[in-house]
Amino acid sequence: MKLPVPPAAGPVTIRSKMNRLVLAVCIPLVIILVVMLSLMVVHTQLYTDLLHNVTTASEFNQDFKSNIDLKMYYYVTGSQYSEGLPIEEVQAAQSLARDLLDTTTNRESRLAIASVLDLCQNLEEKIYQIQDTQDYDERQNQLENNINVLTALIQEFMYDYLYTESVQLDTLQAQMNQRLLTELVLVFLLTAVLLTTLTRHAVRLSRSITQPITDLCARVEELGGGDLTPREPVKADEYEILTLSQGFEQMAGRLQDLLEETTQKQESLRKMELALLQSQINPHFLYNTMDTIIWLIEAGKNREATEMISNLSNFFRFSLSKGKDVITLAEEGEQVLSYLRIQQARYRDILQYTMDLPQELGNTSLPKLTLQPLVENALYHGIKMKRGMGHIAILARREGDCVVLQVTDDGAGIPPARLEELRRAMDQGDRVGFGLATVHERLRLLFGPPYGLEIHSTEGVGTTVCARVPCSGEGGDH
């Protein structure tokens, strides 16, 4: 049975499904927000331009005619209050009219402000004409017939401009209110549709993930009860769940083969190995691990869930080791690392670990499941028995013709009487301790009496368990 490979039109990963769900939510929301912001910016800009035009035109129209007429009157009569010709005021009015013409969109308003600009230019010419006229009566005549008439026309056209822009401002305000109401209704409807679609997709996604995991939990319970008959994998659309399910079935099939081998080889060694393998399929360990995976998925932590599923798959794959009894230290280290990663995800508040297995010792041969029971013993009987954070250190070193594998914890430690009882029981072959006697006896059966376990512990300080194996891996593949 081969693990599934995700084809282009086959099982999809949980991460890709979550990404699709996120995109299905984010893209419509972004579109709605962009459209609303764009409409808001356009409306606001139009309203701001109109308001600016009305305000500017109002200020211009309030005092332009009176100022020009008065200053020209003083100039023509030669009054002591005369400040000269109001050329700068007229040119400023022309500049203001040009600015208004640039920001005005309404046709009638543009015609009015264009007329203002033409009249201002004409007014400037008439002012210069008065300057060139010497006769007093002629000046008075030009003041009344030209200047006063032009300023009156400028004022009238500016009033027309103000009226037209004010009407457009009111119209735009009404349109904005109507559009705002329409947009709110549209957003409400789109949000309702989006929430409905999101809810349906979320429920469908949740069922597509949780139901296969529930089936996997039931299968794990069967495995824990001893039913190792390979079955069809659970039905699922997710690549990770299919991988996990087929991994379980592979594991069940290989374990069945291992169980059949136990009747043909050394009975005592096989019984010990079977005990260790069955401890790795501890239902409580799998239940807790699967519950943690379900919690991570429901919490949206898909990356952590994927990593935990991968670690669980690696843990069982290395537990099986293709049916081999003797593996390398590097392979054993990978299996222990997967186990520690799973346990740290569950006990992150109390568990830290370090591992130092030198690369040059990686090909050292040893019975599989040598280190993992020692690490499990350190966790459950050391770290969990004390308060606060604990640390497990796994290291390997060479001593002469031996390789020493050391597992140290700073947990509760072992009372002296109990420690002496453990040492004596292991020497006599009695089954005591959590996997310690089994590991010790397997090492003795494979490599001889010089090898096995050593236990050192101080109550309240911690425990160190050392496993000695031959440096060259003598003992063969049993």
Image (spheres, rainbow, N blue to C red):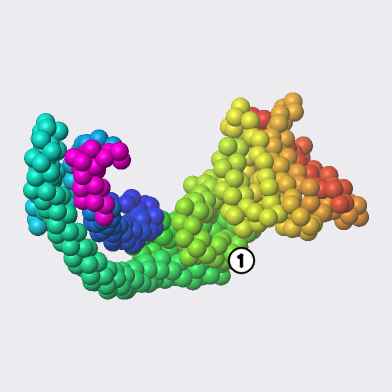
Q: Residue at x 18, y 40 (%)?
A: 76
Q: Which is nearer the eye, 248 or 285?
A: 285
Tell me where the magenta segment starts and ends, as one range. Answer: 62-82
Residue 188 percent location from the top left of the image: 30, 72
Q: Is residue 265 above or below residue 83?
A: below
Q: Main secondary structure of the magenta part?
A: helix
Residue 24, position as x, y percentages in the image? 31, 61
Locate residue 160, reporting x and y percent.
Answer: 14, 59
The verdict on residue 351 being magenta is no
Residue 72 part of the magenta-drawn span? yes
Q: Residue at x 61, y 46 (%)?
A: 336
Q: Is residue 199 left or right of residue 229?
A: left
Q: Position of residue 39 (x, y in %)?
A: 25, 59
Task: Looking at this view, name the residue that lies furthest to the right.
Answer: 417
Taking the image as drawn, is residue 121 in sight? no
Q: Quadrant of the N terminus?
A: bottom left
Q: Quadrant of residue 330?
A: top right
Q: In which quadrant is the C terminus drawn?
A: top right
Find disc 1 in the rendering and name its residue: 284
